[in-house]
Amino acid sequence: MTEEGTLSSGAFLDRWCPHYLSWSRPRTALFLLCIYLFTAAIPYVVTNQIAAWRGVSLFSPEHYIDGMIPYMPWTIVFYFSFYLYFPVVAWFGSGDETRRIEGFVFHVYLTLATWLACLVFIAVPVKVSLRDHVTLDGGIFDPFLESLYNADPPFNSWPSLHVFQSLLIALVIRRWMIQDGKWTNAHSIILSIGWGLLALSTMGIKQHYIFDAITGCVFALLVWFYLCQPKLNQTEH
């Protein structure tokens, strides 16, 4: 590792978690997962509730394509698959010494990017007005959809956190698997299809506009190429 690449993260870990590099892998993975839960997930919930309380929507990004995308309740399965990305990336990021530093750095930038998105939610709020397309008729997926709609007010529209966070995680997992010599065409196909269905699900259950998904992709790529990847490169041998 270069000194430049590990200075700030190393100083933090030395001060607050001096035995981080000697922890067991499950403990390290749990630590990384908790970073997300306490520093990124909670701010999302808070900003969503604030936006719902204000009830302000500055513009409508609805496009005719949103009306062309059918309501697909079955995609709720892939929408909820989003929550599997975080324990998976925490496990991948808790390997050897260099990987643990990269895992910590990635979760820090995932948090910072989420905070930036939360600022957008507060500064430029948009209400998603697509739920009138939803038909709850006693189908097998209806209890899950009802739970989601009741718990998640239709704000925090753009950029879609589901899209941008999952894409960032997919990119870093791909990076790590390539470094380990384990990335294959099959992995590329499986991850692409799985992530594509997750992104589709945000529109298929009328939780997001296509604008939200596109801006989520753009935001993720900007964060990856200009923040995450350069910082991770500094930690390599």
Image: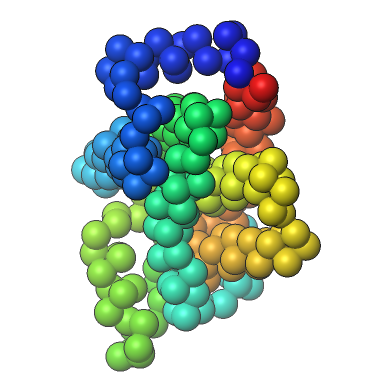
Q: Residue at x 44, y 15 (%)?
A: 10
Image quarter for residue 185?
A: bottom right
Q: Quadrant of the C terminus?
A: top right
Q: In the depicted view, which residue is nearer to us: 99 or 60?
A: 99
Q: Residue at x 42, y 59 (%)?
A: 84
Q: Residue at x 59, y 66 (%)?
A: 194
Image quarter for residue 179?
A: top right
Q: In the depicted view, which residue is nearer to us: 11 or 128?
A: 11
Q: Residue at x 30, y 90 (%)?
A: 138
> Residue 23: percent from the left, percent from the top?
34, 34
> Residue 214: percent from the left, percent from the top?
63, 49
Is 60 located above or below residue 201 in the figure? above
Q: How many marks?
A: 0
The residue sitting at the right extreme is 185
Is 52 located above or below residue 35 in the figure? below
Would you say 48 lies left or right of 200 here?
Answer: left
Q: Quadrant of the N terminus?
A: top right
> Residue 3: percent from the left, percent from the top?
58, 9
Q: How is the image coloured?
A: rainbow
Would you say 117 lies left or right of 181 here?
Answer: left
Whether residue 225 can be seen here: yes
Whether residue 124 can be seen here: no
> Residue 80: percent from the left, percent from the top?
41, 65
